[in-house]
Image (cartoon, rainbow, N blue to C red):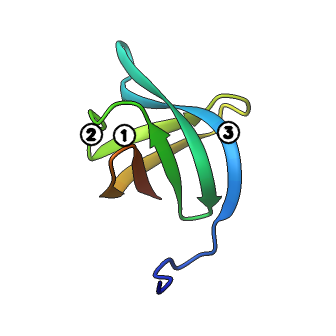
Amino acid sequence: MEERRRCVRTRTLKSARIIIDPKTSALDCIVRNLSPGGALLLVSSLAVPDRFDLIFSASRVRHACRVAWRGSDRVGVAFA
């Protein structure tokens, strides 16, 4: 398989939250790999919008994200 990513991603296992609406709506997810430019998220719901904020649970680091691709239980995102 040809690698198309601009940056090499590091395998990880971190919990995070997909913030859909800062006041009312968020989804839990697991970050499976990470690079300076994006991440692979495991999600339990397919209701992930095209753009959202991702907050890492432990560090509280926040990234604005854009969905690059979708799979059955995973989403590839690019950091905006």
Residue drawn at the location 54% of the way across and 65% of the way down: 37
Residue drawn at the location 46% of the way across and 81% of the way down: 4
* SS of the residue under disc 3: strand
Tags 1 and 2 touching, CB below 8 Å: yes
Q: How far apart are marks 2 and 3 (CA)?
A: 21 Å
Residue that numbered label 2 is attached to: 49
Residue kind at label 3, given as amino acid type: Lys
Q: Which of marks 2 and 3 is in front?
A: 3
* Image label count: 3
Residue 16 lies, in percent from the top left, at 58, 33
Residue kind at label 2, given as amino acid type: Pro
Q: Name the outermost residue toward the bottom.
A: 2
| Up-down relation of residue 25 to residue 5 (above or below) | above
Checking the image for residue 52, the label placed there is 1
Q: Which of marks 3 and 1 is in front?
A: 3
Q: How far apart are marks 3 and 1 (CA)?
A: 18 Å
In this rendered view, identify the residue nearer to me: 22 or 26: 26
Q: Is residue 32 left or right of residue 10?
A: left
Residue 12 lies, in percent from the top left, at 70, 50
Badge 3: how crowded within 10 Å, few (<14), some, or many (20+)? some
Q: How far apart are marks 1 and 2 (CA)?
A: 7 Å
* SS of the residue under disc 1: strand
Residue drawn at the location 47% of the way across and 84% of the way down: 1
Tags 2 and 3 touching, CB below 8 Å: no
Checking the image for residue 14, the label placed there is 3
